[in-house]
Image (cartoon, grey):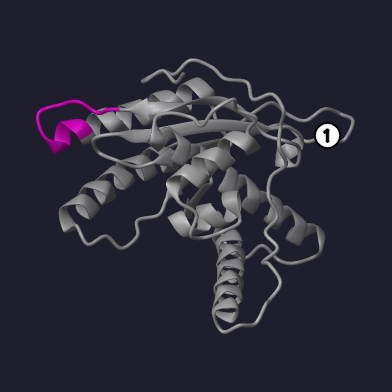
Amino acid sequence: MGGPAGSGQGEAAPLRVLGIDPGIATCGYGLIEAPDGGRARPAVVEFGAVRPRGPGDPARLADLYAAVCRLLDTYRPDTAAVERLYHNRNVSTAAAVGQARGVILLALARAGLPIGEYTPTEVKLAVAGYGGADKRQMQAMVAVQLGLAEPPRPDDAADALGLCLCHLLGQGLQARLASAGYRQDAPGGRRSRALLEAVSRTEHERRAGLRAGRRLPEAAVPRPARTPDGAEGGSTSEPHG
Protein backbone atom coordinates (compact mmCIF):
# COMPACT_ATOMS: atom_id res chain seq x y z
CA MET A 1 0.00 0.00 0.00
CA GLY A 2 1.27 3.52 -0.69
CA GLY A 3 1.81 6.23 -3.25
CA PRO A 4 3.67 6.07 -6.54
CA ALA A 5 7.38 5.62 -6.76
CA GLY A 6 9.55 8.71 -6.74
CA SER A 7 10.83 10.25 -9.92
CA GLY A 8 14.22 9.44 -11.30
CA GLN A 9 15.48 12.91 -10.32
CA GLY A 10 15.97 12.13 -6.66
CA GLU A 11 12.63 13.41 -5.38
CA ALA A 12 10.87 10.99 -3.06
CA ALA A 13 7.27 9.93 -3.58
CA PRO A 14 4.53 11.95 -1.84
CA LEU A 15 3.78 10.81 1.70
CA ARG A 16 0.09 10.31 2.44
CA VAL A 17 -0.90 10.19 6.11
CA LEU A 18 -4.21 8.95 7.54
CA GLY A 19 -5.14 10.28 10.98
CA ILE A 20 -7.92 8.72 13.06
CA ASP A 21 -9.53 10.06 16.22
CA PRO A 22 -11.21 6.93 17.65
CA GLY A 23 -14.77 6.82 18.88
CA ILE A 24 -17.57 4.30 18.83
CA ALA A 25 -20.28 6.94 18.25
CA THR A 26 -18.25 9.37 16.11
CA CYS A 27 -14.84 8.60 14.65
CA GLY A 28 -12.96 11.47 13.01
CA TYR A 29 -10.58 10.90 10.12
CA GLY A 30 -8.32 13.07 8.01
CA LEU A 31 -5.83 12.55 5.20
CA ILE A 32 -2.99 14.84 4.24
CA GLU A 33 -0.31 14.48 1.61
CA ALA A 34 3.15 16.03 1.61
CA PRO A 35 5.33 15.96 -1.52
CA ASP A 36 8.92 14.72 -1.53
CA GLY A 37 8.49 11.99 1.05
CA GLY A 38 6.90 14.29 3.62
CA ARG A 39 9.59 16.96 3.52
CA ALA A 40 7.51 19.50 1.59
CA ARG A 41 4.43 21.41 2.70
CA PRO A 42 1.34 19.24 3.32
CA ALA A 43 -2.09 19.66 1.79
CA VAL A 44 -5.47 18.23 2.73
CA VAL A 45 -6.71 15.25 0.76
CA GLU A 46 -9.90 14.52 2.72
CA PHE A 47 -11.47 14.70 6.15
CA GLY A 48 -14.77 13.86 7.79
CA ALA A 49 -16.38 11.62 10.38
CA VAL A 50 -17.70 8.07 10.49
CA ARG A 51 -20.81 7.52 12.60
CA PRO A 52 -21.16 3.76 13.12
CA ARG A 53 -24.71 2.44 13.21
CA GLY A 54 -26.17 -0.73 14.58
CA PRO A 55 -28.09 -2.26 17.51
CA GLY A 56 -25.37 -2.27 20.15
CA ASP A 57 -21.62 -1.97 20.35
CA PRO A 58 -20.71 -5.17 18.43
CA ALA A 59 -22.62 -4.00 15.35
CA ARG A 60 -21.14 -0.50 15.61
CA LEU A 61 -17.62 -1.88 15.90
CA ALA A 62 -18.19 -4.01 12.81
CA ASP A 63 -19.47 -0.93 10.96
CA LEU A 64 -16.44 1.09 12.12
CA TYR A 65 -14.02 -1.60 10.97
CA ALA A 66 -15.67 -1.74 7.54
CA ALA A 67 -15.56 2.07 7.24
CA VAL A 68 -11.83 2.19 8.04
CA CYS A 69 -11.18 -0.54 5.48
CA ARG A 70 -13.07 1.50 2.88
CA LEU A 71 -10.92 4.54 3.67
CA LEU A 72 -7.78 2.46 3.22
CA ASP A 73 -8.99 1.02 -0.08
CA THR A 74 -10.09 4.42 -1.40
CA TYR A 75 -7.15 6.62 -0.40
CA ARG A 76 -4.27 4.14 0.00
CA PRO A 77 -2.28 6.00 2.67
CA ASP A 78 1.39 5.28 3.31
CA THR A 79 1.22 5.55 7.09
CA ALA A 80 -1.32 6.21 9.84
CA ALA A 81 -1.64 8.04 13.15
CA VAL A 82 -4.12 7.12 15.89
CA GLU A 83 -4.81 8.89 19.16
CA ARG A 84 -3.37 6.95 22.08
CA LEU A 85 -5.77 6.06 24.89
CA TYR A 86 -5.06 8.24 27.91
CA HIS A 87 -6.41 8.36 31.45
CA ASN A 88 -10.13 9.03 31.61
CA ARG A 89 -12.13 9.15 34.82
CA ASN A 90 -15.19 7.94 32.94
CA VAL A 91 -14.50 4.21 32.78
CA SER A 92 -17.32 3.43 30.35
CA THR A 93 -16.12 6.10 27.91
CA ALA A 94 -12.55 4.86 28.12
CA ALA A 95 -13.71 1.28 27.49
CA ALA A 96 -15.73 2.30 24.43
CA VAL A 97 -12.83 4.31 22.98
CA GLY A 98 -10.51 1.37 23.68
CA GLN A 99 -12.81 -0.96 21.74
CA ALA A 100 -12.91 1.47 18.82
CA ARG A 101 -9.12 1.78 18.87
CA GLY A 102 -8.83 -1.98 18.77
CA VAL A 103 -10.77 -2.45 15.56
CA ILE A 104 -9.06 0.58 13.97
CA LEU A 105 -5.60 -0.76 14.81
CA LEU A 106 -6.64 -4.17 13.49
CA ALA A 107 -7.69 -2.68 10.13
CA LEU A 108 -4.47 -0.66 9.86
CA ALA A 109 -2.28 -3.60 10.85
CA ARG A 110 -3.96 -5.94 8.36
CA ALA A 111 -3.28 -3.34 5.67
CA GLY A 112 0.40 -3.42 6.62
CA LEU A 113 0.61 0.29 7.49
CA PRO A 114 3.24 1.75 9.83
CA ILE A 115 1.28 3.20 12.76
CA GLY A 116 2.12 6.07 15.09
CA GLU A 117 0.17 6.55 18.33
CA TYR A 118 0.12 9.92 20.07
CA THR A 119 -1.45 11.41 23.18
CA PRO A 120 -3.41 14.66 22.97
CA THR A 121 -0.52 16.49 24.67
CA GLU A 122 1.93 15.28 22.02
CA VAL A 123 -0.40 16.42 19.25
CA LYS A 124 -0.79 19.84 20.86
CA LEU A 125 2.97 20.21 21.14
CA ALA A 126 3.49 19.30 17.52
CA VAL A 127 0.72 21.45 16.08
CA ALA A 128 0.43 24.43 18.43
CA GLY A 129 3.84 24.32 20.13
CA TYR A 130 2.17 24.18 23.55
CA GLY A 131 0.93 21.08 25.35
CA GLY A 132 -1.89 22.97 27.07
CA ALA A 133 -3.49 24.43 23.94
CA ASP A 134 -7.30 24.38 24.03
CA LYS A 135 -9.56 22.96 21.33
CA ARG A 136 -10.20 26.33 19.67
CA GLN A 137 -6.48 27.09 19.44
CA MET A 138 -5.77 23.65 18.04
CA GLN A 139 -8.45 23.93 15.37
CA ALA A 140 -7.14 27.34 14.33
CA MET A 141 -3.56 26.03 14.08
CA VAL A 142 -4.66 22.99 12.04
CA ALA A 143 -6.42 25.35 9.61
CA VAL A 144 -3.37 27.63 9.36
CA GLN A 145 -0.87 24.84 8.82
CA LEU A 146 -3.02 23.17 6.18
CA GLY A 147 -4.05 26.38 4.41
CA LEU A 148 -7.76 25.98 5.14
CA ALA A 149 -10.02 29.03 5.08
CA GLU A 150 -11.68 27.98 8.35
CA PRO A 151 -11.23 25.34 11.04
CA PRO A 152 -12.30 21.89 9.82
CA ARG A 153 -15.58 20.44 11.01
CA PRO A 154 -16.63 18.35 12.80
CA ASP A 155 -14.29 18.63 15.79
CA ASP A 156 -13.35 14.96 15.50
CA ALA A 157 -12.08 15.55 11.96
CA ALA A 158 -9.99 18.50 13.14
CA ASP A 159 -8.46 16.25 15.80
CA ALA A 160 -7.69 13.64 13.14
CA LEU A 161 -5.94 16.23 10.95
CA GLY A 162 -3.93 17.30 14.00
CA LEU A 163 -2.81 13.70 14.39
CA CYS A 164 -1.71 13.72 10.74
CA LEU A 165 0.42 16.83 11.30
CA CYS A 166 1.92 15.37 14.49
CA HIS A 167 2.82 12.17 12.67
CA LEU A 168 4.29 14.08 9.75
CA LEU A 169 6.49 16.00 12.19
CA GLY A 170 7.60 12.70 13.71
CA GLN A 171 8.47 11.33 10.29
CA GLY A 172 10.57 14.43 9.62
CA LEU A 173 12.37 14.08 12.94
CA GLN A 174 13.16 10.44 12.21
CA ALA A 175 14.49 11.35 8.76
CA ARG A 176 16.78 14.00 10.27
CA LEU A 177 18.00 11.54 12.90
CA ALA A 178 18.73 8.97 10.20
CA SER A 179 20.63 11.50 8.09
CA ALA A 180 22.68 12.41 11.17
CA GLY A 181 23.65 8.76 11.64
CA TYR A 182 21.37 7.84 14.56
CA ARG A 183 19.95 4.33 14.54
CA GLN A 184 16.21 3.96 14.12
CA ASP A 185 15.81 1.14 16.64
CA ALA A 186 12.26 1.91 17.65
CA PRO A 187 9.37 1.02 15.32
CA GLY A 188 6.50 3.23 14.16
CA GLY A 189 6.81 6.60 15.85
CA ARG A 190 8.26 5.65 19.25
CA ARG A 191 11.39 7.70 18.73
CA SER A 192 9.37 10.72 17.65
CA ARG A 193 7.17 10.33 20.73
CA ALA A 194 10.27 10.33 22.92
CA LEU A 195 11.44 13.56 21.28
CA LEU A 196 8.03 15.17 21.71
CA GLU A 197 7.97 14.09 25.35
CA ALA A 198 11.38 15.70 25.82
CA VAL A 199 10.01 18.93 24.36
CA SER A 200 7.03 18.63 26.71
CA ARG A 201 9.36 18.37 29.69
CA THR A 202 11.23 21.45 28.48
CA GLU A 203 7.97 23.39 28.22
CA HIS A 204 6.96 22.26 31.70
CA GLU A 205 10.30 23.42 33.11
CA ARG A 206 9.96 26.75 31.30
CA ARG A 207 6.53 27.38 32.80
CA ALA A 208 7.75 26.35 36.25
CA GLY A 209 10.61 28.81 35.88
CA LEU A 210 8.22 31.60 34.96
CA ARG A 211 6.13 30.88 38.04
CA ALA A 212 9.32 31.11 40.11
CA GLY A 213 10.21 34.47 38.54
CA ARG A 214 12.86 33.13 36.15
CA ARG A 215 12.52 33.55 32.40
CA LEU A 216 13.64 30.57 30.38
CA PRO A 217 13.80 30.31 26.58
CA GLU A 218 10.77 29.04 24.72
CA ALA A 219 10.82 25.36 23.78
CA ALA A 220 11.85 25.05 20.16
CA VAL A 221 9.24 22.89 18.49
CA PRO A 222 9.74 22.30 14.75
CA ARG A 223 6.43 22.64 12.90
CA PRO A 224 5.33 21.63 9.43
CA ALA A 225 5.42 24.65 7.12
CA ARG A 226 2.22 26.41 6.10
CA THR A 227 0.70 25.74 2.75
CA PRO A 228 -1.31 28.47 1.04
CA ASP A 229 -3.73 26.22 -0.81
CA GLY A 230 -5.21 23.23 1.00
CA ALA A 231 -6.98 21.02 -1.54
CA GLU A 232 -10.29 19.98 -0.01
CA GLY A 233 -12.41 17.09 -1.21
CA GLY A 234 -15.77 15.54 -0.48
CA SER A 235 -16.20 13.28 2.54
CA THR A 236 -17.08 9.62 2.16
CA SER A 237 -19.06 9.59 5.40
CA GLU A 238 -19.91 13.09 6.59
CA PRO A 239 -19.19 15.98 4.22
CA HIS A 240 -17.17 18.87 5.52
CA GLY A 241 -17.88 22.41 4.61
Q: From this viewpoint, is residue 119 visible?
A: no
Circle count: 1
Measured as percent of width and height from the top left, residue 230 is found at 64, 25
Q: From this viewpoint, is residue 65 visible?
A: yes
Measured as percent of width and height from the top left, residue 147 is found at 65, 30
Which one is in front, 176 or 209?
Answer: 209
Residue at the image position 48 percent from the left and 15 percent from the top: 234
**Predominant SS of the magenta segment:** loop
Measured as percent of width and height from the top left, residue 82 is found at 44, 46
- Judge whether residue 27 is colored magenta: no
User: Residue 190's image quarter?
Assistant: bottom right
Residue range in magenta is: 51-60
In this picture, is 113 found above or below 174?
above
Instruction: Spot the residue most to the right.
Output: 9
Residue at the image position 22 percent from the left and 62 percent from the top: 89
Residue, disc 1: 11
In the image, 142: left or right of 92?
right
Q: Residue type at mark 1: give it.
A: Glu
Instruction: Spot the residue most to the top.
Output: 234
Q: Quadrant of the N terminus?
A: top right
In this picture, is 230 found above or below 173?
above
Instruction: Spot the residue most to the left.
Output: 55
Which one is in front, 186 or 229?
Answer: 229
Residue at the image position 40 percent from the left and 23 percent from the top: 70
Residue at the image position 9 percent from the left and 28 percent from the top: 55
In the image, 240: left or right of 189?
left
Q: Secondary structure at mark 1?
A: loop
Measured as percent of width and height from the top left, residue 164 is found at 55, 41
In this picture, is 197 found above or below 130?
below
Which one is in front, 145 or 134?
Answer: 134
